[in-house]
Image (tube, grey):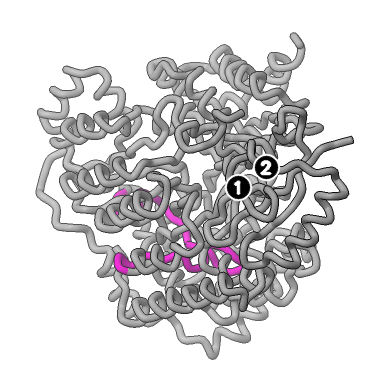
Amino acid sequence: MYRYDEFDAAIVRTRVEEFRDQVERRVSGELTEEQFRPLRLMNGVYLQLHAYMLRVAVPYGELSSTQMRKLAHIARTYDKGYGHFTTRQNIQFNWPTLVDIPKILDELAEVEMHAIQTSGNCIRNVTSDPYAGVAGDEVDDPRPWAEILRQWSTFHPEFTYLPRKFKIAISGGAEDRAAVRFHDIGLRVVRGEGGDIGFRVWVGGGMGRTPRVGREVRSFVPAADLMSYLEAILRVYNLYGRRDNKYKARIKILVDELGLARFIDEVEAEWQKSRASATPLPEEEIARIRAYFAPPPLASLQDNPAELAAARKADPAFDLWIKTNVFSHKVPGYAAVTVSLKPIGGIPGDVTADQMDMIADLADRFSQGQLRATKEQNLVLPYVRQDQLAALWRALDMQNLATANRGLVSDMIACPGLDYCALANARSIPIAQEISNRFADLRRQHDIGSLSLNISGCINACGHHHVGNIGILGVDKRGEEAYQLVLGGDAGEGDAAIGQITGPGFSAEGIVDATEKAVAVYLANRRDADESFIETYRRIGMAPFKEALYDAR
Amino acid sequence: MTTQIVTANRLHDGLVVFRVGESWTQSLSEAQTYTPEEAAALVARIEAEEKTQVVGVYAVEIDDAKVPTKGRERIRALGPTVRPDISKQVEA
């Protein structure tokens, strides 16, 4: 877990006081809305459809139970009793008043949290693998590197006014669980020829109206040079990135326009120039930050204890949950557990204050007080003893947090859509709820198997529809909500792909039927139960899906 | 001839409000109705005079039942459709 040093604590407190003053000056009329808007955005405050929205940074998704309790307290005291976990591992509150926000930021600062750089044209909260430090396939724990990036990017004076927002993701495992190729910069921890730690780097990935798979710019950057190399990328972007057109301002467009080879040349030239005078990351500093992420004291245990096997045998519902919501841990006898924020028919990512308190208590009881937020809008308890899984499951189930659906069709990513968002063209949440209800039978979902279904309420793609195996995009069709169906997307680095639109769109009711038809085509065509939806799609292509969706119409 | 109401977000808490007389209400049913010309003039006057009360002032077309004709504006006026417990959707 990261720790604030005296500088972190001081800058966060100073920023809260600065924002309090700005709010007071806005309310008194000293600042106009035009002057105030960029200031509030720098502090994570949006004005949405119904009210202000505050986006709180959860650094690379890592949360303590104390922080979770504070979020529950904020939801209860300053909001309408709930929060919403986002695809960027952050949490949003939908109803804070402007005049309360400085108080909320004070409360957050008490637990080493803030809303700095959760909006605006700056480097946003760095995202990572929710199983960091847990997964057995890890080259190295990505969190110390994410923390180094966080410290470097926070209030970086050169990168506070970029052409557009800038998102960095870092993955440390053999499997990419951070969608690194859909970020402005994607990093994977790798080992060089001599066994040294370094980074493979992609640039210009992203979703939105111009989806792009990130392009590799370097296969290996030595760890000590991480900052100077990223600075070179950002300098090239800051210099050449377009500022005349918001829709062409992301780095992905710059890479398109310069061409990858020229972009790389520019970055290399800048790096060679700046690298000589840059301070390499000091070994002792890396070691100091690494120590923050040392695993908690764990017992010496064996995998698959007798209690677990007996409980699985005794209760099929528990067995089903173990199959999907439990991730194997590199430490024998432990497991990482996904707390599903996708109950059947629920609102993806929403969690009530009471549930937050409960989850914090369970993190203390079962997971060393630690939690993670995931880009799939769930939570993870990263250090659960396998012999305590049944007790944890029962406790989660009492709060409707034990739906056995991680990675299945009802584990949907959905943006807030037109129910909350000022930018949206169509609602996302009711579609997610309808699909969830349609596939309510968990045994059927388990039979369908691994399937990502992502829903966005507009082309900005906050619901990651481009990378869903099945994606749904809400559009405005002559004043009516309509939905396009997209197939074949994949967020993982190795198979990264942008989904292809099936054809004409569907009504709100029609899209649920269309989704079910797409699933039926998969079931009818899969070689066996081990071939996933995306594997079948890649093998048979779009045609059978189009036929089923449109020919009978 | 379309009928309009005038809406904004209240500065201090961000909540959606509707113009009635020289004041604001959170209730759509209490909103005053205007012709498009009246609404345009009112929006301009509010933008000039009420900068510390509201932000994002604009006129919205309504139907005979005094409900916004556009889906987005209906949701904005009545609250999230997925949370009847905290929205005003029941009013519609």
The secondary structure type at the circle numbered 1 is: strand
| Residue A461 appears in the figure | yes
Vertically, is A126 above or below A65? below
Q: Chain of mark 1?
A: B
Query: What residue is rendered at 13% in x and 40% in y?
Result: A302
Q: Which kind of residue does numbered mark 2 sit on?
A: Ala
Asked whether residue A285 is drawn in magenta, I would say no
- Asked whether A120 falls inside the magenta stretch, the response is yes
Classify the position of the N terminus of chain A by image quarter. bottom left
Q: Chain of mark 2?
A: B
**Who is closer to the viewer here, A307 or A52?**
A52
Q: Are the two marked residues, 2 and 1, in contact with CB atoms closer than 8 angstroms?
A: yes
Quadrant into which the C terminus of chain A falls: top right
Give percent across and percent down for residue B79. 57, 39
Marks 2 and 1, how far apart at CA: 7 Å
Q: Report x, y in % for residue A382.
A: 27, 48
Residue A462 in view (yes/no):
no
Residue at 14% across, 52% down = A298
Magenta-drawn segment: A110-134
Image disc number at residue B31:
2
